[in-house]
Each structure stands twice: as C-alpha cells, then as structure tokens.
Amino acid sequence: MSAPSPPKLRRRLAEAERIARSVVAELDPYCERLQVAGSVRRRTEMVGDIELVAIPHLVPDGLFGDRAINVLAAHLWAVPSWTIVKGGRPESRYTQLELGPGSDCPGLRVDLFLADAHSWGWILLMRTGSAEFSRGALSYWKMCKQIPREQAGSVDGRLVLASGAAVSTPTEESIFAALGLRFIPPTEREVFLPHHYRRRAT
C-alpha cells in the first residue's frame, strides 16, 4: 500500500501574488492574453497552486502560412527553472508546471489553462472558481438555456446551447449578461447565488 500524498503547501496571498507575477512576466511575451485566476484572483487569504489562463501567441508557418506554431508551448519546454508535469504539447488545453530548484519556490505547481478568443470568458470564469461557484454557474446556465439534465452544458471549453451549438464567450461579462446577471466580482465568487445578482429591470 503506497504512502498517502503529503498535504498541499499553502502560501499567504502576498507571497502567492509575487510568485504569480514572476511566472506571468516569464510567459506574457508568448501570449495574446494572460490572466491570473484561481484563489489568487479571488484574493483568498491562503493559496495552494497558482492558476493562469492564457491565449497563446500563434505564428504562421508552412509554405503557404497554413499552419501555426504555438510559441507558448515551445517556450514552456525551453525554461530550465521548471519541469512540465502534464500537457505541454501544442494542442494541450491544460499544462501543469512544477517550479524547480532554481526558482524562488521549488516544488510549487502552476496550472496553465489555454483558451481562445471565443472561450476566454468561460475558461477564466471556471478557473477563477471557487469550484462550488463554477459548478453553480454551469448548472444555472443549463437551467436558463433549457439544456436537458443528461446533456453537457460545456464541451471542449465552450458553453453550448441545447442544440449543441457552441456559444462565444469573449468576456466573463458576456456570460453574466446572457444569464441576466450583473457582473460578479471574483472576490464574491465562493458560492453561486444568482438571485443576489439579477439585473434590475429598467
């Protein structure tokens, strides 16, 4: 019987923000957009992993420019101060990094979630959390859009309608507006309580 995994080390918000800023500074030149998510964005007192959402920078490639190189994925493999634990391929939508001995916080894991212009809002909302808030938001989406219980409300990182058609969510605001809600600040996203955030009729 294998030994249980050690408990996840948690850090105070100020330290986690400093680490996140360092990782963002390293990755930002290779991204179209990059945003800190998770408990750092919610500004919880204690933080476990660092979570980021990114749209990678794509460079045309091939004789006719009909292919694209994901320069973010290429850069991830070139940085000696961390190792790639999961993902890291150009087509990966999720990559987990572990900071190495040469970093300020060896052993700390960074979760990197990739989006595009049409999925940015939804992936940022989901990865900001909390987990309970994200589950509640998806359930409320399904209820509002009359999606059957057995049918998924999100497919491949995109919200969908009952017809299966994907919905473009370029911002978090676009999602809340589609649900008839005002924007919910990340610091208020522990429990999803839609009746507290309904827009008033004008």
Image (cartoon, rainbow, N blue to C red):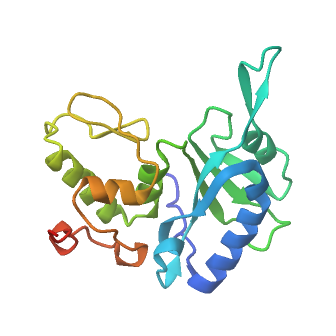
Residue 30 position in % (x across, y down): 76, 49
Compared to residue 27, the image places residue 103 above or below, namely: below
52 left or right of 184?
right
Residue 134 in view in this figure? yes
Residue 108 position in % (x across, y down): 66, 66
Q: For this rendering, which residue is in front, 140 or 181?
A: 181
Q: Residue at x 37, y 54 (%)?
A: 174
> Splitting the image into 4 quarters, where does residue 48 fall?
bottom right
Q: For this rendering, which residue is in front, 128 or 57?
A: 57
Residue 111 position in % (x across, y down): 59, 56
139 left or right of 133?
left
Task: Residue lying at the far front in this picture: please name it.
Answer: 202
Q: Residue at x 57, y 83 (%)?
A: 13
Count of marks placed on residues: 0
Q: Residue at x 69, y 78 (%)?
A: 18
Q: Residue at x 18, y 43 (%)?
A: 145
Q: For this rendering, which residue is in front, 10 or 197?
A: 197
Q: For this rendering, which residue is in front, 97 or 1?
A: 97
Q: Quadrant of the C terminus?
A: bottom left
Compared to residue 125, the image places residue 77 above or below, namely: above
Residue 106 in view in this figure? no
> Splitting the image into 4 quarters, where does residue 103 fall?
bottom right
46 left or right of 35?
left
43 left or right of 133?
right
Residue 25 position in % (x across, y down): 77, 65
Compared to residue 119, the image places residue 132 above or below, namely: below
Task: Residue lying at the far top in this picture: please name it.
Answer: 63
